[in-house]
Image (cartoon, coloured by chain):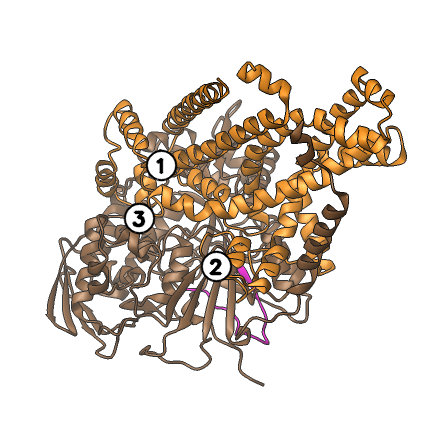
Chain colours: A orange, B brown
Amino acid sequence: MAVRSILRFLLMRLGQTILTLWGLASLVFLMIKLLPGDEAQMAVGAEASPEQIEAARQRLGLDAPVIIQYLLFLSRLVKGDLGVSISTFQPVLNDLVAVFPSTLELVSFAMLVNLAVAVPSAIVAANKRGGAFDGSSRFMAVIFGGLPVFWLALMLQYLLGTVWRLLPISGHNAYGMGAPILTGAATLDALLALDWVALADALRHIALPAVALAALFSTQIFRAFRASLLGVLTSDFMMAVRAKGATARRVLLRHAVPNSVTATLALAGTQFGAMVGSSVLIESVFARKGVGAYMFNAVAQKDSFAVLGSVIFIGAVVCIANLIVDLLQLVVDPRVRAAQLGN
Amino acid sequence: MRHLKSMRFRPGRLAATALLTVALATGWAGGAAAADRASTVIVAMAGQINTLDPMRADYSQTNLIASAVYDTLVTYNAERQLVGRLATEFSLAPDVKSIAMTLRSDVTFHDGTPLTAKDIAYTLDRLKRLGAGVASLIEGYESTTVVDDTHLTINLSKPYSLFLGSLSKIYILNSALVEANLGADDGQGWLQGNDAGSGPYVLDAITAQDVSFSRFDGYWDQVERRPEALVYRRIDEGATRRDELLAGNIDIGLAMADRDAAALASNPALKVSLLQSTVQTEILFNTRVGPTADKRLRRALRLVYDYEGGLASIRGNNGVIANGPLPTPLNCRPDLPVAKRDIEAAKAALAELALDGVTLKMNFQPAFDAQKQEATLFQSNMRDVGLQLELEPIAFPNYLASLKDPEMIPQMMLLEDFAQFPDPGIVLVKGYHSNAIGTNRTGYSNPDVDALLDAALAEPDESRRCEIYKQVQTILYDDAVMIDIYTLRKPAVYYPEKVEAPVASPTGSSISLADVRLAPKS
């Protein structure tokens, strides 16, 4: 029964994911077609003659009615073909596979920083509600929550990188320090090569971008988790736990935290997608290759397949992240499990 | 409740992990030195490298990289005269419908294959087939007749005197290597990340952050102090390029913001080189429809812009105020007046036009800070003469699409443009011939100018072409087809202890990587 419930849940989520991606792809396709600008011209260059532009239009199939282009796009998509970029001449999937590990690396480290800072801070702040740490951390949350990511990135770069020379300010590795590229994520490549110097160098390079990307998101997790914890800590069942003689530490870590984590987990899942979107600014400031920069360039070049491919790719990653979060919620929270699986 | 056990919070372990991370992050790699950094020059610039296929040398980044990996048949020297590279001799036929060429016999590609006339034919034929990028420069190309390994004739379908100059932007491919990796797209996919050149550098690797090259020791044109290795780093953010320069992690910073260049100039370890580019800032009018079809209005508006103020406050005086429609470094320019603001004369001219209540509109690209400021400055200048100017941002693809129909061309468009190669003809023919739909950005149509440009295209003699170009420019100036603002000098910042001052590429908006030299040892 439990297995059937889980399978039904997974199938439903898979269906939702496919519907979401189809909707996303259709919407972006329509938006691209509505935007002014000529894809055929962008494919052949600003100085191309009308004849060259028309030849490119035919070669790229852009002379067909939009609905035919859309159906062709969907039929290719079903086969996993995201098309060929008009600016790099590579299959879009290959392009994305080349740049995505770097973004995934950045977002993963940023998520690590995010949770490592926000969760303990929220626990301490909620436990000592109204105390000095609670007050100062809430104040900091307001400050960092209001700082534009771009500006924060530049400030961190300037102070920690340029003035104090503590950390590198751009790129993935120092000159000559990178491990052989296997995945495109510098830290993972260094680990796979068992090159500890390259790993340390890659970690130094990712530190500032990860912190800059994590800052805003940490404030959200901090607030959400603190509020959730406070709600649990003042609930009736916590009085019962205390009445049974549990220590304050046990009350907090064994009872309050697990019962508060569900909403925060959901938020973290949503943040994962938002972080991929925000990474474009961070990648620009810290001169890192990534999917955000790839998509930004594709939009500027009116490279339809690259834009569509990027959106679908990111959409798929976000859907997978949300699915993982949903599954985690099922594991950690019996209330969610009961509501979703009916047992 | 088993799941709760697995979530036990272990502050001690967390702290240890954090400490280890910090130690890794701040200590271990700090002192490690990269190999042969001293003989490697790292150049940084902004912008995505879409492809290394030299067919797309119309992209600045691709052109920069192609200049290191590939060779051209001809190029331009410092005086902007056409000189041979792979071609030792070249001559335009009297009917301007063919070009005879003799090639060097000592050139090999990076894989050791000798370069022959067959490679020239292959490169030009491929461009004609694909019709993209720099293919737009070889209009009228018909075929190449290969006489022998070092002799060939390029045949054109119509007289086209610009063809020879266009060859300075055509990088020659190793035909055998491309043929072996043709794929379904005529080698475009393969050339995106591979090297089929004979240039002074061999492409080593394309990594997440840079493209690296090593010196080709079999290169035919050996010169002293060419670096052993080059690295091109993409750094989009100007502030990051500046800080990486200060940290010594890059040796040459290109496309530096004027304010950053000014700030770095005070650093004794750094120097600023102002590249004598052909980049010109201009406001193009729609000369065909709307209020700007009236040349009296265009002439009046030319008197409104604050040239000196804009150059000083927006461009840090890194430029020269224009005197005519062509960028100042080009040859064959007539002696035209330097653009000057004259509010009283503008008011008097505008008074005759009964423009009460008319609001003019100008498009600009908001992605470029300086252009945004220039648009705002012009809007303010227009108020001084009693005119309202509406500013409307536009993305470049949208602007290009508007050029297909003169009716759709923006009334005014603020733009930075540069000559693909330093021949006045390429700017004039592409920009002002009425047949040049898509590149004629003002919708300009003047039978006299068309006739002159056609005559220039069919004229084999360079000095006579030069005279024709001067006549055309005089007419264009008289017709006030645009507000020629200034020709820019683009700052490049470098370490003089390490490298020689960078010089502008004659065929691009930046430098040529092939020209980078280490500083002489003191």
Check the picture and name the quadrant holding the N terminus of chain B. Answer: top right
**Chain for numbered disc 1:** A
Tag shown at residue B210: 2
Which subunit holds the residue at mark 2? B
Observer-side mark, 1 or 3, equals: 1
The single residue placed furthest to the right in the displayed view is A131
Q: What is the three-letter code of the residue carrying label 3?
A: Lys
Image coordinates of residue B21 in percent, x first then y, are 68, 54
| First reached walking from the N terminus: tag 2 or tag 3 | 2
Q: Tell whether B155 sits left or right of A62.
A: left
Residue drawn at x 46%, y 31% is A315
Which residue is painted at 89% across and 32% down in the image?
Answer: A131
Q: Tell me, yes or no, if residue B281 can be seen here.
A: yes
Find numbered disc 2 in the image and state the secondary structure of the residue it sits on: strand
Mark 2 or 3: the one toward you: 2
Q: Is residue A219 left or right of residue B475?
A: right
Q: Nearer the viewer, residue B489 or A67?
A: A67
For the residues marked 1 and 2, what is the alpha-carbon distance in whole angstroms? 25 Å
Figure quadrant of residue A175: bottom right
Look at mark 1 in the image and give the residue it sits on.
A305
Q: Position of residue A273 (x, y in %)?
A: 54, 33
* Total numbered labels: 3
